[in-house]
Image (cartoon, coloured by chain):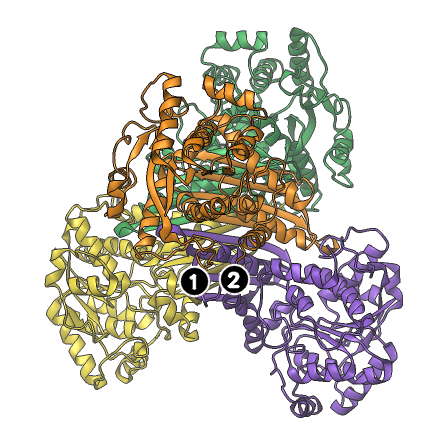
Chain colours: A purple, B orange, C green, D yellow
Amino acid sequence: MIRTLVVGFGQVAANFVVGLERLKSGELEPYGVPLAGYDFGVGVDEVEIVGAIDVDERKVGRDLASIVEGFYGFKNPPRALREVYIYRGLGGEWVKNIFPVRSEEWGESLARVEDLFSELRPDVVLDVTTTQSAPAFSSREELEKAVASGSAAPSQVYAYLALKASKRIGSLVYVNLNPTPVANAPAILELAEQCGCIVLGDDGATGATPLTADLLEHLRERNRRVYSIAQFNIGGNTDFLSLTDEKRSRAKEDTKSSIVKDILGYDAPHYIKPTGYLEPLGDKKFVAMHIWWESFNGAVDELVVIMRINDSPALAGLMVDLARIGWWLKSRGVKGTVYEVNAFYMKKPAPPGSRNVSRYRAYELLKEYLGVK
Amino acid sequence: MIRTLVVGFGQVAANFVVGLERLKSGELEPYGVPLAGYDFGVGVDEVEIVGAIDVDERKVGRDLASIVEGFYGFKNPPRALREVYIYRGLGGEWVKNIFPVRSEEWGESLARVEDLFSELRPDVVLDVTTTQSAPAFSSREELEKAVASGSAAPSQVYAYLALKASKRIGSLVYVNLNPTPVANAPAILELAEQCGCIVLGDDGATGATPLTADLLEHLRERNRRVYSIAQFNIGGNTDFLSLTDEKRSRAKEDTKSSIVKDILGYDAPHYIKPTGYLEPLGDKKFVAMHIWWESFNGAVDELVVIMRINDSPALAGLMVDLARIGWWLKSRGVKGTVYEVNAFYMKKPAPPGSRNVSRYRAYELLKEYLGVK
Amino acid sequence: MIRTLVVGFGQVAANFVVGLERLKSGELEPYGVPLAGYDFGVGVDEVEIVGAIDVDERKVGRDLASIVEGFYGFKNPPRALREVYIYRGLGGEWVKNIFPVRSEEWGESLARVEDLFSELRPDVVLDVTTTQSAPAFSSREELEKAVASGSAAPSQVYAYLALKASKRIGSLVYVNLNPTPVANAPAILELAEQCGCIVLGDDGATGATPLTADLLEHLRERNRRVYSIAQFNIGGNTDFLSLTDEKRSRAKEDTKSSIVKDILGYDAPHYIKPTGYLEPLGDKKFVAMHIWWESFNGAVDELVVIMRINDSPALAGLMVDLARIGWWLKSRGVKGTVYEVNAFYMKKPAPPGSRNVSRYRAYELLKEYLGVK
Amino acid sequence: MIRTLVVGFGQVAANFVVGLERLKSGELEPYGVPLAGYDFGVGVDEVEIVGAIDVDERKVGRDLASIVEGFYGFKNPPRALREVYIYRGLGGEWVKNIFPVRSEEWGESLARVEDLFSELRPDVVLDVTTTQSAPAFSSREELEKAVASGSAAPSQVYAYLALKASKRIGSLVYVNLNPTPVANAPAILELAEQCGCIVLGDDGATGATPLTADLLEHLRERNRRVYSIAQFNIGGNTDFLSLTDEKRSRAKEDTKSSIVKDILGYDAPHYIKPTGYLEPLGDKKFVAMHIWWESFNGAVDELVVIMRINDSPALAGLMVDLARIGWWLKSRGVKGTVYEVNAFYMKKPAPPGSRNVSRYRAYELLKEYLGVK
């Protein structure tokens, strides 16, 4: 049994816990779970949700079944979710303009959350809090100072506390799925190695970015010269709402843009950004992308890609794999981070300084690492 | 020096010879030549056009420079093309409604073209004649009967005669880039093995099909369940005109459709066809594709791809590689056909019965085969 | 009360009867009913379904509620539909390969259906049978011969019989919404005038065609020179299935293509056709359109339109208006056909020889004719 | 002869002067000139460029032929342009980060430019300076203060000076084609009426906005309920570069967004903005638009529009009409502004407070006003 804790209980987490339970009950096919068809010794059935952490006071203390129904409209939520609860997270400065949060003295907050990790004893922590911008702390001192002062981003603080708690409860795997540098923060990575823990991240690779990576790889393999790439994204979920804040948007933009040079080998002019918030679109965002290039003998070709995609379920599907893979890594005594896992599942694969490769390549690397065919 | 002969001098061949000479003179970057950046011991400079074969009487006997300028609008054609000529091909029953051809007794035709191969002594023959439908002859007897009676498709006859001529002039490589089964005809393949020759094919992988293959691979790697695929193609070049003939269209459709099951592992409902002819579009076709699927937790996503692509230069770029690879194979004494080459460059990779893999995978296989990194 | 009879009970009719009853009960807003916001003296409440005619033996004799639920998946169908029935139509030669029909001597069929019209006493007949191809009969003799022999298209026969029945039951309005020439058949139009009846048609203007008309008008008003137009349509409903039959496809193609010259004033090269059948798309078809043109100072612009549209509800929405307008015309003693109505609602507006105008223009004409602002 | 002066000599002006001269010499068809086919008594031949005003020091004092060739790549510019010159404009604070400008005392600048108008004696002034944001001055005092202090936008100052000069040189027509409120500034409009002049504007209706207007009209006429509209624009010309400045972007956004409520009758949620700058796209911008709506019986439809359009030539084509119409108005002694002209050619039609109507409707109004059929 893989004790799994979710940090940040929004649309993604709701899709994850509902989808997972429906998978386990056989009600649903495992579509959207990349390695569902491969056996590396850890089944979907082994993943068990032990709790969730959130700062929205309307959710704290309630069971997951009532939340997924009341907030996210899932009718007849799986029974299993009635006995799993939401625990109060860390302050809520970052999101207090989005929903009601409770004030608390910061030091108290830190102590309480560290205890929470100790009590829930997770094997795998899946962080799906909303996008936050913060530096990738290099030194332990800097990090601890930023944690203590409250200037580090929530994901960094959660990771720090989880790693600290691991001294009491044993090794765990922290998976960071938002763009905040966690697995890419040298100080956190170093800490993980010292604790015998694993940190995976950053920024779950869903939406248009993985497809863009593979389209660019397709062009590169034909030696076509890309003139420019424009990519627009617009959606109506909390993630897009929070990206209207410019600082957060920049964090996202960086992880999205790095693929161009990494894959093509040159920095083709590009505009790749989350563009706006439009409430009626909900969780099914609209993406438009334009790429054009020079082919043989001076010919100029053009490609437009249009998508309507559900961001949250896509990420939730990856979480099912990541919980299983996390367990697999833990049971093998791996420490630090694992590029072969991050390269496929993350937009900004750790360790810091790693290159993005095409998702096709990453998929091969992943399967090889896990020893599946 | 790689003696290269082109069969079928249309838009593709024109782009090939112009682009190649411009590459050799350093006037052009090798965009659209997949392996331009890899060194496997055979340079682009070594490819030399020794002639072209065609049945259009307006072209026969003229030099390539005048043809590419007069028929295809290339201003200031490379000087080197002034000394390469077009030789009369085989009858022309298949295309007589498209342009003027000369009548000739069939047996005479066969003898004349066989002699032509002997005189021109090609190392590599690149067949870019227009789409033709014909069976994939299994036995030598069937094939020879069909050649003698004129019922085999021109590409099959050309390949047969080239292989026959090889007894006089030594081993050669026949590369068939149209959908007619040549490398996929067991009888021709067997003949190639006996002659110590190589046959590559069939149907050059340009246009929307390779991209579709890689998009499907992208979906498969995420275990998304594809509901359906619709793909339309419309263009204004001779190839589209000839596809308004239903029999030819079917040949094309088959090579295009096989990718769905080969890559996804199940036969998702699809409609993938060259759709129509619209003269003003010229060589830059319009492609529209719709794919939708089920992702995690029942979510339904949708993707639309729109392209304006120049078919002919894209195929011409592959020909530069194929001439070099052909020579590489010949110089190593390879016989028969080579799946690792066909899998990347062809829509229907020989030997018969081979599966289509994603182009990403095929690219890896190809580089491994050639020993490049 | 407007006694309304539907001929052909498929997806369109199902949407019409369900939507109408939901409108009347106030459960639904009248979206998709063009003149819902205009008062010309005839309310939606006045439209009453008195029955439907079909040849599918699985439907004949059953009530509409059970059909819309069983065949078209509408849960909790409106109660009112439980007391309206499906009556057996005319033979079924045209559709016998699609669903089970009953054989009957043709003369008997004709007499029975004529009686049916007399018994049901419709004010308005809405013909939404599937696409059929047949000539636009010019003379009464030709028409009557074709009706008697069974060579006329079903819609023509139904119209003929309805007009004949009008002698017994008084004036009625026959609205033909499929591409078969009915209102555009001079012989039927003449008959309508003699009977004091009204015939509206042909081919309900939904889907991509009206939008194409308005896009072309937009270009014409800026004097842009259109180079070419490509339009693809693919869907999974019975209509698309039946269009895989080439003869029917041609009927459709003609009504679609005529707009180009009518609106632009010159016959820009175009490819506008229902393209194929792909079952999973169901009633929500996929449309892709490409238009490009020359603008000022030689600039070349390009437009691509992509749609996912539900054909059947769109047509059903027009039927609500047409029933009301039909009654309005009848109550004013109009005879023959009315261009101002057809021009907006039909792809091939009668009387024969009429020009297509942009839908914007047609909308103005319609409102003026009805005296609404 | 219509003495025509261009203010702001960039890509649009270059296309205008080249296109106009090519039209006059019969070298070009008048594509992209909306009323080219209608005779209202003023021919294209009568339009004569008497000069252009700009602040880019690299252009000032040079002839138009050398500028269109050197800056905009038009080979063999029309001879007539060799004898028309560029005169120095007003300061250049707004654009000094984009190209070199000359410093000058502001009061001197004002006097010099007023004299310039007096010397060049234009009948029609076409303002195609780059986007600037400024208030729509209501009172004469405010306006004059802002002009004197340099806080008014350049277009407002140019208009003010031109109107002032008209006292010496007689009535003229000032046409403002950028989003700055000029014809929509009550103070300027009042001034025009007092001087017997005409002010047309604001913001030339090219690009995606007019098409959006007509698509929305199309939906409204079918009573479809629009859920949301997303529209992205990206390009590589100076206009897009200057829009990366947020203040300017807002000016643009306002004129673009007002169409939604004006045409639909309700404020459907929308995101309509110039999105970004991507140099390789040049003057041919990429536009992507998503609209979805509810149709009859609860059906949900979806539309995506993709465009590659050349902004500058499109606007230049409208300028040809506006010069002719300007003259026509002047010769009839019209004063102030004319809604019927603005409604078709402008995104924010004056007088202030006017509603946007669909372009179809505006086109009808325009033709009626000019008395053409």
Find residue B161 and report its image quarter.
top left
Mark 1 — residue?
A: D234
- Residue at 41% x, 52% y: name it: A295
Q: Is residue B280 visible?
A: no
Give me the C-alpha separation between circle 2 and circle 1.
10 Å
For badge 2, the amino acid type reads: Phe
Name the spot of residue A191 as percent of width and height, x first. 72, 84
For badge 1, the amino acid type reads: Ile
Name the spot of residue D239 as percent of width and height, x first. 35, 67
- Residue at 55% x, 73% y: name it: A254
Find residue D123 and report its image quarter.
bottom left
Q: Nearer the viewer, residue D108 or D143?
A: D108
D173 left or right of D297 in image: left
The answer to whether the residue labelled 2 contacts the one labelled 1, judged by CB atoms less than 8 Å apart, is yes
Q: Does A92 appear above or below B25?
A: below
Name the spot of residue C164 as percent of width and height, x first. 58, 13
- Chain hosting mark 1: D
Q: Does B134 appear above or below C216?
A: above
